[in-house]
Structure formats: structure tokens, C-alpha cells
Image (tube, rainbow, N blue to C red):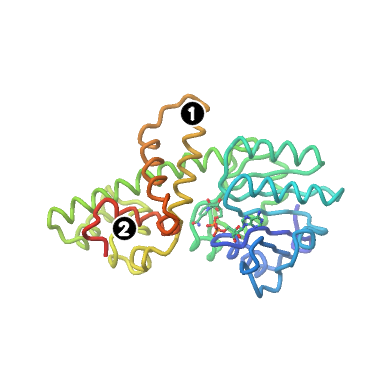
Amino acid sequence: MVTNNRGICFVGLGTMGLPMAQCLSEQGFAVASWDVSDQAGDGLPHRRTTLAEAASGAEVVITMLPEGDHVRQVHGAIHGLGSSPRRIFIDSSTIDVTTTRQLAVTAAEHGHGFVDAPVSGGAEGARAGALSFMTGGRPEDLAAVRPLLVAMGGKILHFGPASSGQAAKACHNMICGITALGVCEAFALAEASGLDPQKFFDLCKGAAAQSWILENRCPVPNLTPAAPSSNGYAPGFAARLMAKDLRLAQAAAQALGQETPFGAEAARRFTDFSVEEEAGALDFSAIYRTIRPANDG
Ligand code: NAD
């Protein structure tokens, strides 16, 4: 069992990682954090200047990075530091199933444990310590790190061996991407029909069309003050990350021969939208601009 006296190396201090690391630190865990960007986490007392410094003596390594290659790089660098007491690597990034399986095998070859634990709940969930974790890995490794996950989140679901958490996350985010496009198209049609968007929003949120995406990422500006659309589409969850997750779901579907035509269309739409760096950095709900360009606020 991980206690708050033993070291946690937290790598990746972006939109999600920073509040997650803060959450652990505020609850008394001994965090040493690091990010490849000098600006990320600058000034935090637990921020270290090198990865080696952050990893030194750490019993648990948590990664919260954009893509599989970044996680592979960081794990490789830590394995390269030489032998250490058994660690457990937790990867909370959203990455592909194949890389995740390789990370688990490599960790085991070095005598370490591995848990994939991608999250849902967004930056607000991370700040509130209310993330949902979809996990994969050996039950004993998950049991050992459960106190850390409990500190950062409310819901912890174990789906099976390493990579099962990533499989669940891919399916989950495919629902989010498809739903987001559905919400955008319905609001575009409502506006084109001359309906009051606020009234339409109020209708949907109390009716069968209700969803987390509708309530928290409504694409029409100024219907909900906290939504990215009401704040210049600042993320939230960047469109490029949504596109990445939808492509991960497509990779999983193709590997298994499962047809997911709505998922494929969502992957294509968000990938096209994210080609321009500026658009890709906006919240995914900004895709509304391509669906109702004349009225994007
Ligand atoms: P982000 O781009 O805000 O942050 C990523 C951080 O990783 C950056 O600070 C970057 O400098 C750092 N980084 C990149 N490569 C690195 C390396 N090799 N070594 C050390 N640091 C490195 O991304 P984010 O929004 O925090 O998302 C992180 C992961 O969480 C992604 O996989 C994303 O899909 C997933 N996720 C994000 C959200 C969300 O709402 N933002 C929600 C759920 C899951």
C-alpha cells in the first residue's frame, strides 16, 4: 500500500497534470514533479529541474502526457537511470492500447508494476479531486496505488489487465465526440429555425437530450457562463486531443474488426478541424464554428 511518506514522481504539468499533482501534494503526499517545458509548473515547491531528480527514490511514477511516444520516452529515461526498488508506474495520459501493453511489459522486465489509469472529468474534475479513473493492470498493483487515485478522484473502475483502462477510455471518448457533433448540429438547426438558443438549451438539459457534453460544453456562447464557448473557446479539452482520442478509438476498432461508422466520421471531422494549430488548441466545442459559421459568437 502506498502511504503519503513515500515519493511520488509526477511527470506532465499541463492542463490536467498540474491540478492532479497539486491535489496529491495538498493531501500530504510527497510529490516531486517535472515537465519538459520550463514554464509548466514554474514556481511550484514540488517542481524539480530534472526528471532524474524527480524520479530519485520515487515509489510511484505518474505520467500525464499528450501521447504514447512521450510516455514511452519518460518511462525509458527512468528505466535508464539504473536499478531501483520496485516502483509502480501509473499512466493517466490517454494513449493507445498497443503502446500501453508494451509499457507494462517493459516495466515488468525492469521489475516494476504498471497501471494504466486514464481519466474523465476534465480540468475542473482534476482541480476538485473528482476525476473518474478507468484502470487496467494487476489487482495487487492497483490496490497498492488506490489511495493516490482516491485522492485525485471519486470513481475508480478496474476493467482487467494492463491496457483495459485505455480500451474503456477510447470507447468513452468516442461517445463524447459523437455526442458533441450531435449537440452542435442540433443547436445549428435550432438557430437556423429561429429558435431561442437559451430556451432550446433549457429544454434539452431537462429532457432526454441531456448529457454532460450538452450541460458543460454547450457550443453556443453565453448560454452557460462556465462553458468554454462563453470564454472564447479556451479549453477545457483541446480539439486536437479530442481528435487524437477519436483516432485511438478508430485504431482499436480496426484492430478488432469492429465497425464504428459514427466514430469514424467524428474522428475525421475533429482531425480536419484540428489541422490548423490555432483551431486545434481551442476547446473541442469550437467545432461549432464549422457547423454554424455565420453565428459563432
Ligand atoms: P497538456 O498539453 O495541457 O499538458 C501536457 C504536458 O506534458 C505539457 O505541460 C507538456 O510540456 C508536457 N510534456 C510533453 N512531453 C513531455 C515529455 N516528454 N516529458 C515531460 N513532459 C512533457 O495536456 P492535458 O490536457 O493536460 O492532457 C494530458 C493527457 O490527458 C492527454 O493524453 C489527454 O488526452 C488526457 N486528458 C485530457 C483531458 C483534458 O480535459 N484536458 C481530460 C482527460 C484526459
Q: Give the residue type at disc 2.
A: Pro
The residue drawn where x is 53% and y is 59% is 130
Residue identifier under label 1: 254
Q: Is mark 1 within 8 Å of ligand 1?
A: no
14 is higher (above) or lower (below) than 63: below
Residue 146 pos. (x, y %)? 67, 51
Left or right, 119 with reference to 258: right
Residue 165 pos. (x, y %)? 58, 41
Of the pair 113 and 277, the residue shown nearer to us: 277
Quadrant of the rendered image holding ligand 1: bottom right
Q: Secondary structure at mark 1?
A: helix
The residue drawn where x is 42% and y is 49% is 275
Are there few (<14), some (14-19), or many (20+) residues within 10 Å of tag 2?
many
Quadrant in the picture for the C terminus? bottom left
Residue 217 in which image quadrant: bottom left
Left or right, 4 with reference to 282: right
Residue 96 pos. (x, y %)? 57, 40
* Furthest-front residue in this view: 276
Left or right, 160 with reference to 106: left
Left or right, 206 with reference to 121: left
281 is higher (above) or lower (below) than 26: above
Q: Secondary structure at mark 2?
A: loop
Q: What is the C-alpha distance between the residues marked 2 and 1?
A: 30 Å
Q: Give the residue type at disc 1.
A: Gln
Are there few (<14), some (14-19), or many (20+) residues within 10 Å of tag 1?
few
Q: Is mark 2 within 8 Å of ligand 1?
A: no
Count all numbered tags in the image, as a single digit. Answer: 2
The residue drawn where x is 78% and y is 44% is 112
Residue identifier under label 2: 219
Of pointers 2 and 1, the one earlier in the residue sequence: 2
Of the pair 20 and 283, the residue shown nearer to us: 283
Residue 55 pos. (x, y %)? 77, 58
